[in-house]
Amino acid sequence: MTHSDRIVSRVISLARLPGSKRGREVAKELRAHLDDLAEEARSQGYDEEGAARIVRMRFGEPEEIAAAFASVYAPERWATRILQSAILLASSTLAVMVVVGTVQSIAAVFSSGSIVSTLRALHQESFGFAAITAGYCSLYAGERLFPASLAKAVLPSVALGLCLAALFVCLIPQQAVLPLAAFACAACARLLQRRAISFLWFAGTALPLLIAWVLFGRLIPCWQFPCLVWIGLTISCKALQEIVRLFERVFMLPAH
Amino acid sequence: MGFDRELLKGSIALLLLRLLSERDMYGYEIIQESMRRSQDAFEFKEGTLYPALHQLHKRGYIRSEWRTGENGKQRKYYGLTAAGKKAARRSEQEWFSFTKVVNAILSKANT
């Protein structure tokens, strides 16, 4: 990596430009300028080290230039983030619906139930689907906002969980516990997926369910149902993990 | 001669619009031209030129296109749009009115 490459790389990584295409174009433009500067310095008799010093002095601090770019593109960056978040949330909710619908349909087949009536009843679980997505994605958002601190990364999940608890208690007071347990399950699964013992992440989907069971008694009529919920949650969290990976590959600016 | 950074920041858009009203230029060329005209008195960190150019581009005052030069190097050229030409005229008038007023105040203060 040349000296110019390092300057460009630093500017692009700090500028938070919306879209990788714009990042590549700005990088190309800055590199052309730095090449011209270095060429001018060499034509004046400077060696490579001297030319690099001149380039650094005349071009300015990468941090200052990046801050100026970040300010220019702030509105686009926010619009892009909102759009990307909406895409992530919509695709995550859809994935959870498909997974839970599939699991319940398979269960209906084995218990001689009707797939059609199972799928029709799915809309009654919309709070649960939203809660799973919210639990998983809020922890992911926390990780993005506070990459260095796990305690801080959990804060958005805790805040959202409390808001959802208040909302569910108002809207569906009789059935509020199950979607809240689903929220906690999804957040715990994400938490365990990111830790050193990530192969234990599926325990994250079971623990909050067990706690809810202990605290609130039998939420569900028969023993098969909690297992079904756990299987649905676990596969949903795996699907969400893959969606988040795909999201990062598609939308996140690659390092230069 | 070093100028106050805030003063430079406030006038960079005017200078860019004025230079680009004469012909299409790329970033390095703009720097060279401004240094030549100011006899090297007008110095600023060259990297900060690009955010300013992108800001003007976003406002619709300038357009840009990649062109390949004689030496085979690709460079991004900037030129004024119709809105940019109007903005350049307006900014110049504002600048002259402003400096006239400031000069009038300063000359009275000195007498």
Image: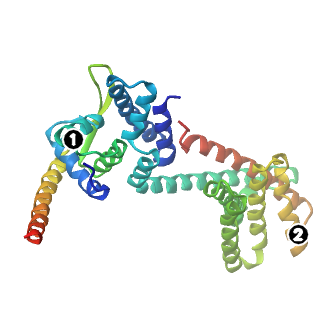
Q: Is residue A45 above or below residue A185?
A: above
Which label sits on residue B49? Answer: none
Which label sits on residue B34? Answer: 1
Where, by quadrant of the figure, is residue A163 drawn? bottom right
Return the chain for callout 2.
Answer: A
Residue A89 in the figure: left or right of residue A6? right
Q: Which residue is drawn at 72% across and 64% down?
A: A128
Q: Which residue lies furthest to the front in this view?
A: B111
Residue A40 % position (x, y): 32, 27
User: Which residue was labeled with disc 2?
Assistant: A213
Q: Which residue is drawn at 45% across and 38% down?
A: A21
Q: Residues within 10 Å of mark 2 (few under 14, many from 20)?
A: some
Nearest to the observer: residue A198 or residue B5:
B5
Residue A126 % position (x, y): 68, 64
Q: Which residue is drawn at 48% across and 32% down?
A: A3
Nearest to the observer: residue A253 or residue B30:
B30
Residue A105 in the figure: left or right of residue B68? right
Where, by quadrant of the figure, is residue A139 drawn? bottom right
Three-letter amino acid code of the residue under disc 1: Ser
Residue B102 in the figure: left or right of residue A151? left
Q: Can residue A5 be seen in this view?
A: yes
Circle 1/circle 2 CB separation < 8 Å: no
The answer for how far apart the CA atoms under marks 1 and 2 are is 74 Å
Q: Residues within 10 Å of mark 1 (few under 14, many from 20)?
A: some
Q: Which residue is drawn at 38% across and 25% down?
A: A46
